[in-house]
Image (cartoon, rainbow, N blue to C red):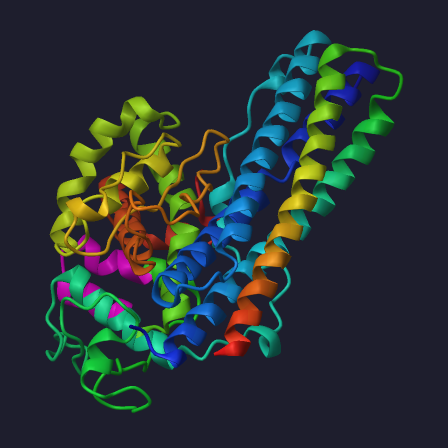
């Protein structure tokens, strides 16, 4: 290997190791946190860190842009020294990092979530999204029912019946529940493949709310990876119509209760395109969208406006992008004829 | 309106997500530092415009990353302060 070849290999290795994936992972986690805090602020009318977190996500967009600038610079340099082959872009591997557990487990003592109230909130929203009325039992799941469609706040249905703090009526059966969003994503793919809405509801309601909400952080990079394989190229804004045409019917079939704007916003993020203009409060009878995502920086991380002006779009219910993203991934896996286990780890993946 | 328990639970869940994000941010910061050092050693003496652009991009990314992390810390502090008053 010549000195130039050795230099080229080193530069390319450095470019490949730039933390694009970590930035995407961080952006998705922060965005889920932002959506939750936006909900808290809407309920409490207190500043709870929303502005700071929205700023953080915008900063992360800038980070992504700067890293890509650096990668472009290194690619240009490789071409300039005659290493055009080494300058070829590397595949987007951020989806693998998104499925990996945190590098350093978060201290439980500091972040242990009391999931009980959120559990009812999560379950009630899952019922609404899947169009499965509370009080029934998912076939084969042995699940007590829960919830009353129409509530959009944490514990809405349960609270209405004085169940807060109780253990029985509003609680989903957590037996066999997974604790890892990545595993939940794989499990959800099964009922999506067989168009089993009852099964989908059962898988989703069984988990603790933080696990389910974690889907929102991991699904966009995975969906982008799958869409890339489906289309044969990295998706962009021009691919949105076709992608919508191919995926939306199945997603809506599984989630008849999902607000209209949620899937377009999600697909826009997957394509790293500007999200469609969300509905305003006066246009939408129920709380919904307004996720604000898909910034030009490419992480799709930027949250919506942190302001609360009269024309502000309704905040997205944090459950909606989580569940919709998981169903979208299931639909994409089905279209590609892939087993959910292909998402299990790098050693199983073809990407 | 939501109950106090629900608000606290939502804040806890948000902080958990942000904490995981912070972990990823710190990992990204470490990788950026390593990349800067590696490139500085490999490309020392190069006056190529593309190399300068790469250095500038990495430097900007490191600065933005630090500001991002600080913003998340401020967000968590504010959220925790509010939760403590509930």
Q: Residue at x 60, y 75 (%)?
A: A110
Q: Residue at x 28, y 60 (%)?
A: A188
Q: Position of residue A168 (x, y in %)?
A: 25, 90
Q: Where is A143 relative to B39, above or below? A: below
* Dominant secondary-structure state across the stretch colored magenta: helix
Q: Is residue A13 visible?
A: no
Residue range (magenta): A187-205
Residue nearest the observer in this picture, A351 or A254: A254
Quadrant holding the N terminus of chain A: top right
Q: Position of residue A191 (x, y in %)?
A: 20, 60
Among the 4 quarters of the image, the one containing residue A158 = bottom left
Residue A130 part of the magenta-drawn span: no
Q: Where is A216 relative to A206, above or below? A: above
Q: Position of residue A202 (x, y in %)?
A: 22, 71
Q: Residue at x 21, y 27 (%)?
A: A241
Left or right, residue A20 beside residue A130? right
């Amino acid at each position: 290997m010549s000195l130039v070849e050795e230099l080229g290999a080193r530069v390319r290795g450095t470019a490949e190791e730039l933390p694009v994936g970590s930035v995407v992972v961080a952006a998705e986690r922060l965005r889920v946190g932002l959506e939750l805090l936006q909900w808290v602020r809407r309920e409490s009318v207190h500043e709870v860190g929303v502005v700071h977190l929205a700023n953080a996500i915008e900063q992360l967009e800038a980070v992504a842009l700067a890293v890509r600038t650096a990668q472009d610079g290194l690619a240009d340099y490789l071409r300039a020294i005659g290493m055009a082959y080494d300058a070829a872009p590397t595949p987007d591997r951020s989806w693998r990092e998104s499925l990996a557990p945190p590098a350093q487990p978060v201290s439980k003592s500091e972040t242990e979530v009391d999931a009980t109230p959120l559990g009812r909130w999560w379950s009630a929203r899952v019922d609404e999204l899947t169009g499965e009325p509370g009080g029934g039992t998912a076939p084969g799941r042995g699940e007590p029912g829960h919830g009353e469609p129409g509530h959009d706040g944490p514990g809405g249905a349960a609270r209405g019946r004085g169940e807060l703090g109780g253990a029985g009526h509003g609680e989903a059966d957590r037996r066999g529940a997974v604790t890892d969003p990545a595993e939940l994503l794989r499990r959800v793919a099964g009922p999506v493949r067989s168009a089993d809405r009852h099964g989908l509801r059962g898988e989703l309601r069984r988990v603790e709310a933080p696990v389910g909400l974690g889907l929102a952080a991991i699904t966009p990079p995975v969906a982008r990876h799958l869409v890339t394989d489906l289309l044969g190229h990295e998706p962009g804004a021009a691919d949105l119509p076709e992608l919508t045409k191919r995926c939306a019917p199945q997603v809506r079939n599984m989630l008849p209760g999902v607000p209209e704007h949620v899937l377009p916003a999600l697909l826009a993020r997957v394509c790293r395109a500007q999200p469609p203009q969300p509905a305003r409060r006066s246009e939408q009878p129920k709380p919904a969208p307004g996720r604000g995502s898909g910034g030009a920086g490419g992480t799709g991380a930027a949250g919506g406006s942190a302001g609360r002006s009269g024309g502000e779009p309704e905040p997205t219910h944090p459950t909606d992008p989580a569940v919709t993203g998981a169903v979208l991934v299931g639909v994409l896996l089905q279209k590609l004829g892939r087993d959910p286990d292909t998402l299990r780890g790098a050693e199983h993946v073809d990407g | 309106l939501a109950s106090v328990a629900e608000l606290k639970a939502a804040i806890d869940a948000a902080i958990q997500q942000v904490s995981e994000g912070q972990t990823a941010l710190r990992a990204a910061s470490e990788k950026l530092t390593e990349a800067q050092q590696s490139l500085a050693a490999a490309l020392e003496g190069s006056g190529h415009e593309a190399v300068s652009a790469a250095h500038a991009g990495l430097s900007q990314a490191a600065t933005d990353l630090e500001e991002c992390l600080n913003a998340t810390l401020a967000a968590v502090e504010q959220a925790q302060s509010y939760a403590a008053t509930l």
